[in-house]
Amino acid sequence: MFKILESKMLVDNICKFVVEAPLVARSCEPGQFIIVRVDEFGERIPLTIADYDREAGTVTIVVQLLGVSTNKMSKLKAGDSFADFIGPLGQPSEFIHEDIEELKKKSYVFVAGGLGTAPVYPQVKWFNEHGIKCDVIIGTKCKDTLIYEDEMKAIAGDDHVFITTDDGSYIRKGMGTDVLKDLVEDQGKHYDICVAIGPMIMMKFVCKLTKELGIPTIVSMNPIMVDGTGMCGGCRVQVGNETKFACVDGPEFDGHLVDFGSMMSRGRMYRPQEAEAKDHVCNIGLGR
């Protein structure tokens, strides 16, 4: 059992858990994920690591309440426990293997969409801990769905964080791609690498833009993962001429080589079954 030290709703429908998991915290790196089960009857849920503290032995995850299992998870409070909390899984972000002095010569921009802001955080934090500043673009539907604004500004600096909302309710109106285009074309910014993490459609359009701008781009295929071991095949992704598995080969890949069309199509396959399961459980209560 893995004790929950903190359970907090960040905004409506998104909650954060700080979990006591010293073995995971000791080994995990930015870009990796864990598998969590609420209880012995629960399904396996892959979640990207949103933060970790090696000294305290804790790992932070951020969860969007979408289906049966995540809604059960939202009922857990500090002092409760997860049945399983397995990891770290997947490959770390490639930049952690680079020579720091060479990395300091590169300019990184992160584009975070909605919930994707959480897994972007440990990556930007890693850069900050190594004395490297990055620009961070955070896009969200509206002010009420914005997460990690203060946390991101604390590590990246106010002048390196750019926030935009779809409806214009906070800072500026537009998509993350609008901000990136403005920074490059109107403000003269140069970026060597872009990292985009968020909804599949958002990453697709970021890659379309960065291809036009000539900026190599990394994306995270965490949204399509299922069992986290490569056994189910649900997370296979076409990267150029190769078939990869997000959970064992990724979850991060060259965004300009990813076949987003097949990924998005597969992501819609089980929506009727998911809706039916959610309606059934809601009718009888979120118990076992």
Image (cartoon, grey):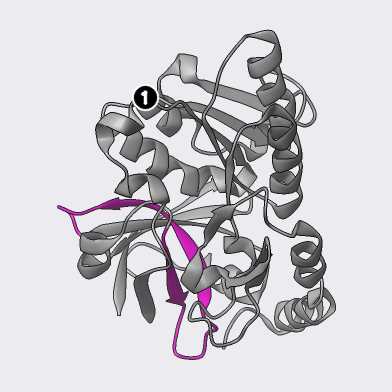
Q: Is 203 placed above or below 272 here?
A: above
Question: Left or right: where does residue 115 sit relative to residue 88?
Answer: right
Which residue matches tag 1?
105
Q: Quadrant of residue 272?
A: bottom right
Is residue 45 within the magenta segment? yes
Residue at the image point whose x is 66% and y is 25% from the top? 180
Frontmost residue, 38 versus 159: 159
Rendering coords of residue 226 (x, y %): 59, 77
Is residue 25 within the magenta segment? no
Q: Is 60 placed above or below 285 here?
A: above
Question: Left or right: where does residue 50 sit relative to residue 264?
Answer: left
Residue at the image point whose x is 60% and y is 32% from the top? 138
Q: Quadrant of residue 285?
A: bottom right
SS of the residue at dot 1? loop
Over which residues does the magenta segment extend?
32-57
State how many labels appear. 1
Q: Is residue 81 visible?
A: no
Q: Is 286 placed above or below 24 here?
A: below
Label 1: few (<14), some or many (≥20) within 10 Å? Answer: few
Of all residues shown, which one is farthest toward the top?
A: 187
Frontmost residue, 130 versus 79: 130
